[in-house]
Each structure stands twice: as structure tokens, then as C-alpha cells.
């Protein structure tokens, strides 16, 4: 009975450890950048509230003028160097002008070789919808800032800008605010309690060993958090050096 109880508790723990290790290795092999798109409507030629407004850009009549700000965050512990950043605007828009900088170095980003070629060829179909930048380095815990001025055919501009990076091992995801570790702790306690409860239903005569193992499991959650933050704190200290 004791052997079955031990196996019931150990086997899920071993599987969880292996799964957690593989997930950690997968996350460590990829650099996950984050993007955030902010859109502000500047003016509309036929606004229902303000009435008809005449809008011109370089003496050209504009329907709806939009300001777009795109931020690329590197909140990882790795630097990303030598990559191409590509931005595609939605179908109902046209890029009028743009400005991109690396907020860490305050240096304006250079156009990629392909974009320069298209600019010299005056390929307006490409230039009206695309911006492509050559980024030398995006250091850890820094960001890129891209400001766009667009004309759109509708008052409400879609925020489905395509932002991509040509770099092996680098992916870009929508920006998410950092979450608290309270949810992780509560989830861990719930798993421990449910495991102990169902184990007790299977072996009601082993209440005391089950309670001991559940208490030890809860303690291990706190120990794991302490070890995790110790390692992360040490890595942060090394990164600062």
C-alpha cells in the first residue's frame, strides 16, 4: 500500500519536472520580443461631430489622418543584433511619413537595403504600405520606437499592423503587462490539495502520510520560488555588469 501511495505521488511529480524542464529549455532557445500599437486619429475630412474639415499633406488632399506609434520591447535577458524589422500597414491605409529610433542609443534606424532600392525605384505600391529597417542591435530591457503618419479611407483605422523580424530564434508577440506570481502560487496550492484529496479517496487509511506529503509539497512551492528569484536576481546582477 505504501509503495502504491509513493508511486502515485512521485510519478506525477517526475512528469511535471520533465515537462517543466522541457518548457524551460524551449523558452530559453527563443527570444520573445513584444509589440504594442497605439493609434490616434488626428483629423477627418467628413467628421459627423466636427463637420467637414479640409486636410492636406504636401498639398495633397487627405481623407482621414492617423498617427500610429509602434513599440518593440526586448524584456528578455538577451541582446538581439543584426536583424530586419518589417512593418506592413492595414489595407485601408497609406503611409505618408515615418520615423524610427532606438530608445537606448537615441539613434535613428536606417532603412534596409531593399527599402532603399524600392525608394530609388519609386515603387509607390511598396512605399505606401511598407517600412523596413535595418537594426544593428536591440539590447536587453530596451525598445524600438516607430512613429507613422497615415492616411486611411475609414475614420477608424484597423490596428492589425503586421510587424515581423527576420532573425533566427526571435519571435514577436503582442505586448502583455507583467503578471503577479500570486496566480502561480494559488495554482500550485490547488494542485497539491486536489492531488492529496483524490489520493485520500483512493487510500483513506493513509491519511497521515498523505497530509505529510501535501504539506511538504506546499513547502516545495515556496522553496522553488525562492530558488527561482535567487537565480533571476543573480542573472540580473550579471547583466548589469
Image: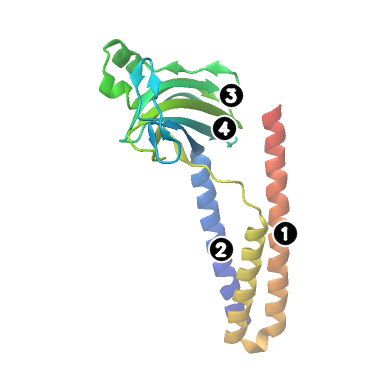
Spatial CA distance of label 4 from label 2 is 30 Å
Q: Does the residue at mark 2 contact the one at mark 1 (Cβ under 8 Å)?
A: no
33 or 14, nearer to the observer: 33
* Image disc number at residue 78: 4
Disc number lying in front (2 or 1): 1
Q: Which residue is mark 1?
A: 222
Q: Earlier in the sequence, mark 3 or mark 1?
A: 3
- Residue at numbered disc 3: 103
First reached walking from the N terminus: tag 1 or tag 4: 4
Label 1 and label 4: CA atoms lie apart by 27 Å
Q: Position of residue 77 (x, y in %)?
A: 60, 35
Q: Where is 196 relative to 48, above or below?
A: below
User: What residue is shown with label 2?
Assistant: 14
Q: Nearer the viewer, mark 4 or mark 2?
A: 4
Q: Which element carries disc 3, helix, strand or loop?
A: loop
Instruction: Residue 120: name its quadrant.
Output: top left
Which image quarter holds the C terminus? top right
Residue 126: image x %, image y %?
Answer: 29, 23
> Could you tell me how far apart the alpha carbons at marks 3 and 2 are, in whole angstroms?
44 Å
Amino acid at each position: 500500500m505504501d509503495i502504491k501511495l509513493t508511486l502515485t505521488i512521485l510519478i506525477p511529480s517526475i512528469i511535471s519536472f520533465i515537462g517543466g524542464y522541457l518548457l524551460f529549455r524551449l523558452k530559453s532557445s527563443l527570444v520573445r520580443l513584444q509589440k504594442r500599437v497605439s493609434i490616434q486619429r488626428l483629423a477627418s475630412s467628413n467628421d459627423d461631430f466636427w463637420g467637414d474639415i479640409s486636410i492636406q499633406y504636401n498639398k495633397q488632399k487627405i481623407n482621414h489622418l492617423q498617427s500610429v506609434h509602434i513599440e518593440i520591447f526586448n524584456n528578455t535577458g538577451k541582446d538581439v543584433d543584426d536583424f530586419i524589422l518589417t512593418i506592413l500597414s492595414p489595407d485601408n491605409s497609406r503611409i505618408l511619413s515615418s520615423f524610427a529610433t532606438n530608445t537606448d542609443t537615441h539613434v535613428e534606424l536606417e532603412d534596409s537595403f531593399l527599402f532603399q532600392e524600392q525608394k530609388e525605384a519609386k515603387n509607390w505600391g511598396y512605399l505606401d504600405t511598407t517600412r523596413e529597417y535595418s537594426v544593428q542591435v536591440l539590447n536587453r530591457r530596451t525598445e524600438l520606437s516607430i512613429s507613422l503618419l497615415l492616411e486611411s479611407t475609414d475614420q477608424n483605422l484597423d490596428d492589425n499592423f503586421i510587424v515581423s523580424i527576420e532573425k533566427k530564434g526571435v519571435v514577436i508577440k503582442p505586448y502583455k503587462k507583467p503578471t503577479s506570481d500570486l496566480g502561480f502560487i494559488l495554482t500550485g496550492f490547488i494542485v497539491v490539495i486536489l492531488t492529496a484529496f483524490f489520493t485520500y479517496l483512493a487510500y483513506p487509511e493513509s491519511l497521515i502520510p498523505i497530509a505529510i506529503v501535501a504539506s511538504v509539497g506546499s513547502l516545495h512551492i515556496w522553496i522553488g520560488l525562492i530558488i527561482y528569484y535567487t537565480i533571476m536576481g543573480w542573472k540580473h546582477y550579471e547583466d548589469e555588469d
